[in-house]
Amino acid sequence: MPVTRPSHLPDTLKITLWDFTWYTRTGPGEPFADLDAAFAQAVERGYNTVRICAMPYLLFGSGLDTGRLRLGPLGGAYAQRVRWYDVPATTQIDARAHLLALFEAARRHDSFVILSSWEYQQSSSFAEDRAWFDALMAVDPEHRPTALADALADLIDFLADHGGLDDRIAFTELHNEVQGGFLTEGLTGDLVVALRPRLERGLARFRERHPERMVTVNYARVPVGSLRGVPRDIDVAVFHPYVYGVLDELLDTFALRDPSRPFPQERARRELLRPGAPALEDWAPPAGDRWRLDATVVGHREVYVHDWCDPQRWDAWLYERYAVHRTAMEQQLRTWIDAAADWSAETGVPFVFGEGWIGYTPLHGTFEEGPVGAAFCRLAVTASARAGAWGAVVCSNAAPHHPMWNDLGLQQECNAQLSAVGGRPGPPQGVDRC
């Protein structure tokens, strides 16, 4: 049987996605320079939970000194107009002290934290040097989920030893979007299915250390057709339903995620890019920072177009084609929510949408923040709540490091809708496993 949901946790997790930015953007004037202010803003918008990369392997697995951790941009102007990557300057933190500060602020603001890791996707690309990345890649791929489990267990012990801050943990994910990063190295075929044995070993290791705590993994999309690959002994079913739709048409038209096809440079200049944009092959970080491209799963073409697009032209491209995709996008969203709810009902665990809804757009694009995106937020949170989700985001872009944070009304409205309907009751009592 799954672990019982602790009684002190909220009936509904209203989640804002702070990812790795809570430690990459801590300089003066940055969104996480003052963690108390960030939590106060989150509570004002109706949130009670933040979801983070807790950098567990760096802190408790790598053996590296993190007392003076230096973090910064990918190099030069590269990725400065890309969401999550627009770190403006190098800063220095005591990483363990910063973790404690986050949890102390969460307690002061009666908020909770979903522990996760983005380390096998991009976290280490922001470090001053490649030592963190090299430490991650030195772990045998077969053992990476287990290494993360040990690191997260140590992290929880660390929080418990510092004032019982572990009471702020909502639940623990071994990693973010497990089928979309370096956790799958060496695997072929259906990666959701192929990855299951590695994940199950990681989950088992975590439970050896903390059998009373809720633990899980999470998946990009809702992998309909591959749900047999999701471990049956997770305590929370976590999915990220990005529907894409019209955004998929843009990605396909410009081959942004398919380097096997030629990049249509001239068409991009005509339809998307700002005047004076360099050619794709001429856009890169300085030579000394090129290693960072190996440490992130976001491809060079996507970074280039996000950096050099005219946001208004990008938005117009999507709006001009949206009508053709609207019905299919809405239907896919509903289907994925229903599939997640069905999987949850069959396994007896709560389900959560820790990210979503349309997809990855440039920092200054407003398609997801505008009328189409706002309508999707309303549709998604309403459908999620009615289906019985324990928690959901308003939108992945609704966080202090995105422009959408300024839309208080939409976030308050959507979080109120989540609360009005609420999630299903927790799983059956007891921690014994069938």
Image (cartoon, rainbow, N blue to C red):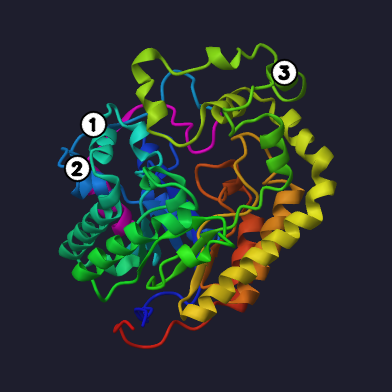
Question: Which residues, given as a range, are shown in magenta?
Answer: 81-105
Residue bearing mark 3: 269
Q: Is residue 23 above or below residue 201?
A: above
Residue bearing mark 1: 131
- Residue 32 placement: quadrant: top left
- Residue 317 placement: quadrant: top right
Mark before the other along the chain sequence, 1 or 2:
2
**Residue 384 forms part of the magenta stretch:** no
Inter-mark Cα distance, 3 to 2:
43 Å
Residue 398 seen in render: yes
Sort mark 3 into few (<14), some (14-19) or many (20+) by Cα contacts within 10 Å. some
Residue occupying the point 17% across, 38% down: 64
Image coordinates of residue 369 in percent, x first then y, are: 67, 46
Image coordinates of residue 2 in percent, x first then y, are: 37, 79
Mark before the other along the chain sequence, 1 or 3:
1
Query: Looking at the picture, which amino acid does disc 2 mark?
Result: Ser
Residue bearing mark 2: 62
Query: Looking at the picture, which amino acid does disc 1 mark?
Result: Ala
Q: Looking at the rendering, in which quadrant would you find the C terminus?
A: bottom left
Inter-mark Cα distance, 1 to 2:
9 Å
